[in-house]
Image (cartoon, rainbow, N blue to C red):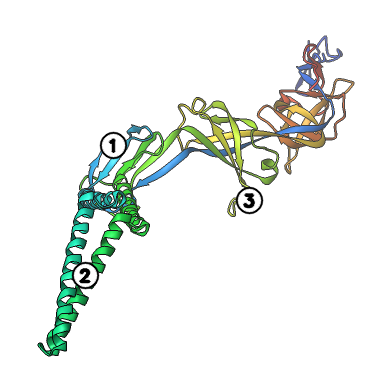
Amino acid sequence: MGMLVGGVLYWNYPFANAQPMSAPEAQPMPVEVVTLESQGSYAAQRTYTGVLVAAKTSELSFELPGKITQLSVDEGDHVQAGDQLAVLDDRHLSARIAQTKAEHAQQLAILEELKAGPREEVIAAAEAEVRQLHAELQLQQANKKRREQLIERSAISRETLEDAVFGAEAAQGRLDAAKSRLEELRQGTRVEQIDAQQARVAGLEAQLVDLQHEQEDTRLVAPFSGTIARRNFDEGAVITAGQAVFRLVQHEPLEAWFGLPPEAATSLSAGDVLPVTVDDQTRQAKVTGIVPELDTITRTQTVVLSLDANTSRGWVPAQVARVSLASERNEEGFWLPNSALLQGSRGLWSVYVVEEDHRVQRREVEIIYSESERSFVRGTLSSGERVIASGVNRLVPDMHVRIHPTSESEN
């Protein structure tokens, strides 16, 4: 009922003296926690980026200058070791080879003749010549004797006698020379003559081999199996010695080259097997080389990992490769899921710890090492404490929580 007092109407309520009703108390938020366990070290997993490299790559060229008359392959063609790829004009070489072969055959025939010695017919002719000259000498000596008798009677002049004496001496000289030739023929060819002729034949044989090697060099063959990555000339082009005609790349097997920090490189040894990842495919590779010096630009050491033909199938050179290495590091701390971390200020992070009264308190931590799903941290934490594992953005200090009964686990 109301009452009018001084123009103001007052109402009387039957519940005016009743106490106000209190709001219902909020239910504690359910949370999942992990129980901390102190660790004295952790295994740091580092990923390094490298590149796939062909085990063999060659710029193929001729050792001789000349004109290209034939090209057997093109870019993209797969070739086997020993396949002929290109040919140079070898007409001049063929002519020189034919000429040298003819000269070699001639000198070889002379050598065989020297080794066989003089024929019986030649010796018989020499003997007949000796007999003929011997008879001529006897005639000249008889003529000389008669003229000596005539000069005593002054029947001939002194000049006529001198002609007879000269004739006898000349006949003697011809006879001596014929006897010497006959003796030489009977004894056969001298060793010095045979050796000299053998040297001439050997020189021609060496010259012929050199020319044949030059002719072989006019054929360009694949030194290993691979794929033609580039062709630089067409038929008819005149090239100089050493000009690259093809670029040949061996796709399988491959090598993966990585630049690693010295502390990581020195932890590896030849023969170690490591996982190499390319385009989300991971395969095993073996360490085959570690360069013992630093790259002057990157300040890293090059580590070479080899993949066999089966392992590298489907991968090609120049693809980006990755390798992960684990190293043990001595450091006190705790493993926590990344979902338990709350970013704070000045580069620090925070976590929420559930106290005995089931209220949460905020603690600052420092991340020492982080992986995709967890991090190794240190800070104002103790073993056995319970850290909220997820949903930390919904929490505030002193908030009352309820631990999910199946969530407690050790990290």
Labels 1 and 2 touching (C-beta < 8 A) = no
Pick whichever of labels 1 and 2 is earlier in the sequence.
1
Position of 163 with respect to 341 (left or right) is: left
Q: Secondary structure beneath disc 3?
A: loop
Label at residue 174: 2
Tell me residue 141's x, y (percent).
19, 74
Label 2 neighbour load within 10 Å: few <14, some 14-19, many 20+ = some
Position of 362 with respect to 213 (left or right) is: right
Residue at the far front: name it: 153
Measure the alpha-carbon separation of dots 1 and 2. 75 Å
Tell me residue 306's x, y (percent).
55, 34
Position of 232 with respect to 226 (left or right) is: left
Whether residue 149 is situated above or below residue 383 in the rendered picture: below
The residue where tag 3 is placed is: 293
Measure the alpha-carbon separation of dots 2 and 3. 86 Å
Position of 310 with respect to 18 (left or right) is: left
Q: Amino acid at mark 3?
A: Glu
Pick whichever of labels 2 and 3 is earlier in the sequence.
2
Q: Residue, x 43% and y 41% (percent of image)? A: 57
Q: Residue, x 58% and y 53% (percent of image)? A: 297
Measure the alpha-carbon separation of dots 3 and 1. 40 Å
The residue where tag 1 is placed is: 73
Q: Secondary structure beneath disc 1?
A: loop
